[in-house]
Amino acid sequence: MEEKKEVLRMENIVKVYSNGVMANKGINFSVLAGEIHALSGENGAGKSTLMKIIFGEEQPTSGDIYVNGEKTIISSPQLAISLGIGMVHQHFMLVPSLTVAENVILGVEPRKGLLINRKKAHRQVEEMADKFNMQVSPRARIEDLTVGQKQKVEILKALFRGAKILILDEPTAVLTPQETTELFEELKRLKSNGYTIIFISHKLNEVKELCDRISIIRQGRSMGLYDMKDVTEQDISNLMVGRDVILNIEKKPPEIGDPTIRVKDLNISGENGKTFVNNVSFLLREGEILGIAGVEGNGQSELAESLTGLRKYNSGSIEMCGKEISGCNIKDIRALSVSHIPEDRMTTGVAPALSITENTLSDKISQEKFSKLGIIDKGKIKQYGLEMAKDYQVLCKNPDVRIDSLSGGNIQKAVLARELSSDPKVIIANQPTRGVDVGATEFIRKRLIKMRDNKKSVLLISSDLNEVLGLSDSIIVMHDGQIVAYFPDAGKISELELGKYMLGIEKQSESEIKEACHGQ
Amino acid sequence: MIDYSFIVDFLFMWIRVATPILLTSLGAVICERTGVVNLGLDGIMLISALFGVLGSAWGGNLFWGLAAGVGAALIVSGVFAYFHLMLKANAVLCGTAVNTIAGGLTVFVLQLATGEKGSSSSLKSFSFPAVNIPIIKDIPVLGDILSGHNVITYFAFLMVIVITVFLYRTPMGLRMRAVGENPSAASSVGQNVVKIRFLAILLCGVMAGMGGMYLSMGYLSMFTRDMVAGRGFIALAACAMGQANPVGALISSMVFSFFDGLSNILQLLQIPSEFVQMLPYGATILGLTVYSIQKQRQKNKKNKEIQQNVIK
Amino acid sequence: MDSNKRIHLIVDMAKLMIAILVSCGLVTAIVLGTSSEPMNAFFSFFIGPFTSFRRIGNIVEAASPLMFTALAVILIFGAGQFSMIAEGAFFIGTLGAMMVATSVPLPTGIHSAVALLVAAAMGATVALIPALLKMKWQVSEVVTSLMLNYIVQFFSIYMVSYYFREVSSSSLASIAFLDTSLLPVIIGGTRIHAGIILAVILCLLIYFLLFRTTFGMKLRIVGNNPKFANYSGIKVTGIMVASQVIAGALAGMGGGAELLGMYTRFKWTSSPGYGWTGIAVALLARNNPLLVPLAALFMGYLNVGANIMARNSDVSSEVVKIIQGVMILMIAAEALLKKWKQRMIVEAAKAETGMKGDVVND
């Protein structure tokens, strides 16, 4: 490789958050001018934290940053931008009611006297979009755009501010395959124009296709910097997780029993008329883990919400343990022995300021075991909290501490404790191991399998292919709100095959999909 | 009884009582747009009302009154902003604190200045002048209603336009709307959310301060204890009902002050004064409720339409 | 992670001390800046309340109504609501108690009890209005409760002056309460009345309600994270409304107790503002009902001190409102001392991961 200038170097970056979580434990990172540099690591490895530090959104607790060879303290995004660093966030940083142009010029508005020079703004944005071949109208409102178009606006925003180093945080997570292809074209064009790109992803095939070099981090530590041509996907994956990925999680063959969830012609749409779930039918049976695979945002979350009573559905029927739930509230559904591990544990899964014990009891405090005539039995509760912490290996000094003082993995174990200890017949687990450390992940997966071995039903929604393939007995693939594939035996499919359906490249025939209803 | 001059008098009065609510609700619009609920408006109005009077009495002219009133509003708003934005105190609590301080401070300072706790009638303070508008003042009926108001009243109506242009046509207005709707988006392009909100709170303070000064240096020509009487809260309600839009705030302010004006006139009749005094507050609750029901109905209707389309 | 809990506690205490010190400093500054006899004013304010048995009694008397309203505030804020109705509920409570005390003859004891219950019922009713409007139509409870406070004030005064007025009195006053309705004085030489016992009992009860009952636990979950509460199958709106109704009843009963304990006629021409002071007391007590008596006594002490100062010197008693406001600001300031707290947490985290001081280089 020819001599290239180092545009960014980070040394010994340590970051401790105010809740005591240590996200970066001495990371080293270096990027050369004009390269596409991958930053890979598992969920929660500390990638996003590192990027927030580069962009000035977080300050490192210790460590040095060099931009173009000069030691710099990036105290704010403002400073990062003036240093030529631009960020495309995973969750778009756009203002929905404003136009594309307004979003792009925000903060660097062309002026005419005291007012905004709208004409000039529109022209500038148009020119820039043309130059990099990104088709968006400057007059369109953000709320009317597709996800792919929004991402283009994000990139334009960074370029408009003179960014030379572009950071993209898991940019393909929300894109369709075509949009991903388009994005890669755009990024390659940018590279050939001399831009430097930091591409954060854990999709190894994408990384392999697009990037020149790769830095890998694991649990907050650097695992090295490699030329892409020197490493295989297997190598990268080993470095990321620190062992060969166990694709085949040990489990007995399933003993399938009677149906517990019966979904028929289900339709769910949002307030703005967007269709989330489109004519979905399937059956979940006792002793079975049914995996729902799919790129996030293809209706899985809405399906889970409707199954648990958090969201109304428009038409079709959901039968839970033999009862149609259209008239039921959340409490009634829980009373049917349905448990729910929610997608986002901090916003729906816990009350952060309450204790571990209280969090594990939120759904069953009124049961006679814990209270009589509305008065809590303090001793029983305390004992229960201790039991839960012990059974579910929630690492804490004692279960009376606030739950938000724990790490993500331990919080998730507490959520699991609450949901599994109520002796459910059906468990709806939505991204049960997201942002959770390896140890906790393994623990949670084993518990789910144990439930299934005890003749319970598990509906597993996960965007982690390894997880879906490893845990499930049978698999449904969702794309754009529809079921596009059903595999009665999860052991017989490969990751690659699943990927094709997830990305909407292939679709099974009607009759194959109908198999998901097992003739009912 | 209800004759021509009565109606003209009422309409003239209506504009008069609308002025402080309009000014303050325009301030609230700026705050609300950046995502800050300013519950301290009542207190800011009260403090400006007093310091405007004191400034003009001590400085010997109107200018010092204006300077003192605006200055006091800026200081109090600055304290609110510092505690809410820098020290992350809850906005409702900050507002409550400002109102509590204002209630005490104004009486305390009033007593220091005049030896009385009730009003500033012993001070020789200045008021903002009333102005006749050429041409319009000669139009029959209309001239009687629209001309001859206090200069601050005209300022208030002018500010509806100024703030509309500011919010929708200037760089800072764009930034404020962005900060209110998606603060992380604004900060991701290097906008300092705290700074912009700070500025909005200060601007809001100036508007509320003008509203307060109108009460003591226009509507009346002295300060009386607790003279704001919840107008800051009513302005906040007007802002909410006007969907944080200057023109919306104008309309809602006019609706609420209609009842304020009505209560002024009804007091002349044989109706218990306490009942009459309740009117503007009751009207505000009613107005907000009707507005919320309306909003919900529209939403439901829209959803139904969309879903019917989906099913078709 | 116990260290985190300890750090929270230390920082909380330090903040409280700062709030009190700043308040004292503020009084000093105001007195020095405005008074011609500062030493006299200082003495009256800080020492004055302890100079006689009767004055110590005054502190306790002043604390009594604040305990009721602070409990109400704790319940409302605890459920994540920002209704300011404690003020209005207190005042309508005085109206309710006045009506029963003047017009419904009943035996001693029962008479007071009935008056207090009517006061509580009226307080609850008033508090229900913003709660229901919010539940049904999403009307902001902040604004509606503020407006209601004014309506309640005018309505109560209207009732007194049109239906219960003492005709022979030149200023506004109701007819005298029947003797049977008055709350007994419990400590001779003071006016400390049975209402204070009721207040202390209620503090214990509300603590029990919050931390020992299923309702209390649900309320705390709703207040901390309503989405999580809903997901857990808790009826979120029900809890929100119930908490406001109970709070209204508490504040209303407080109004009744204040009226029947301290007065023989209804004489207010405007609301005394105990609902607002209740917010300061609730914050001072860190939202813990068991600490409410202490916080209320402190606030009572400030009030009594300010009154003595106003009588004995040239500094007016409104100083105390300024102090209350400043205290609310200081205690509400989440980020005060944050850097210090953060440093302690970082040290603790480093100690736990075994990385002392320097970072180990990979």
Image (spheres, coloured by chain):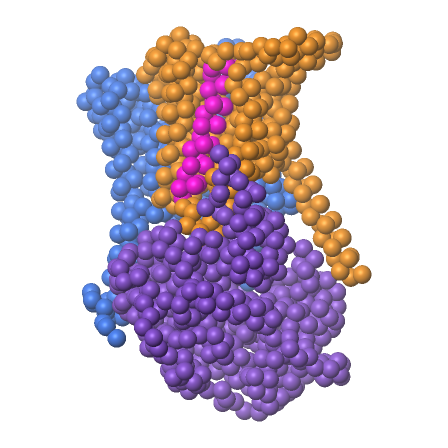
Chain colours: A purple, B orange, C blue
Residue A460 included in the magenta stretch of the image: no
Residue at x 58% of width, y 89% of height: A491
Classify the position of the N terminus of chain A by image quarter.
bottom left
Which secondary structure is most common in the magenta stretch?
A: helix
User: Is the residue A478 above or below the residue A352 in the image?
Assistant: below
C155 relative position to A262: left or right: left
Where, by quadrant of the figure, is residue C37 drawn? top left
Q: How many marks?
A: 0
User: Is the residue B140 above or below the residue A465 in the image?
Assistant: above
**Is residue C306 visible to us here?**
yes
Residue at x 26% of width, y 59% of height: A71
- Which residue is farthest right? B312
- Looking at the rendering, the stretch of residues picked out in magenta corresponds to B194-219
Q: Residue B94: x, y in percent?
A: 41, 38
B203 or C135, which lies in front? B203
Q: Residue B30: x, y in percent?
A: 51, 36
User: Is the residue C64 above or below the residue C291 in the image?
Assistant: above
A391 relative position to C227: left or right: left
Residue B210 included in the magenta stretch of the image: yes
A466 or B164, which lies in front? B164
Residue at x 52% of width, y 55% of height: A128
User: Is the residue C193 above or below the residue C175 in the image?
Assistant: below
**Is residue A384 visible to us here?**
no
Classify the position of the C terminus of chain A by image quarter.
bottom right
Residue at x 70% of width, y 82% of height: A508
C142 or C91, which lies in front? C142
Q: Residue A360: x, y in percent?
A: 47, 67
A236 or C289, which lies in front? A236
Q: Residue A148: x, y in percent?
A: 58, 63
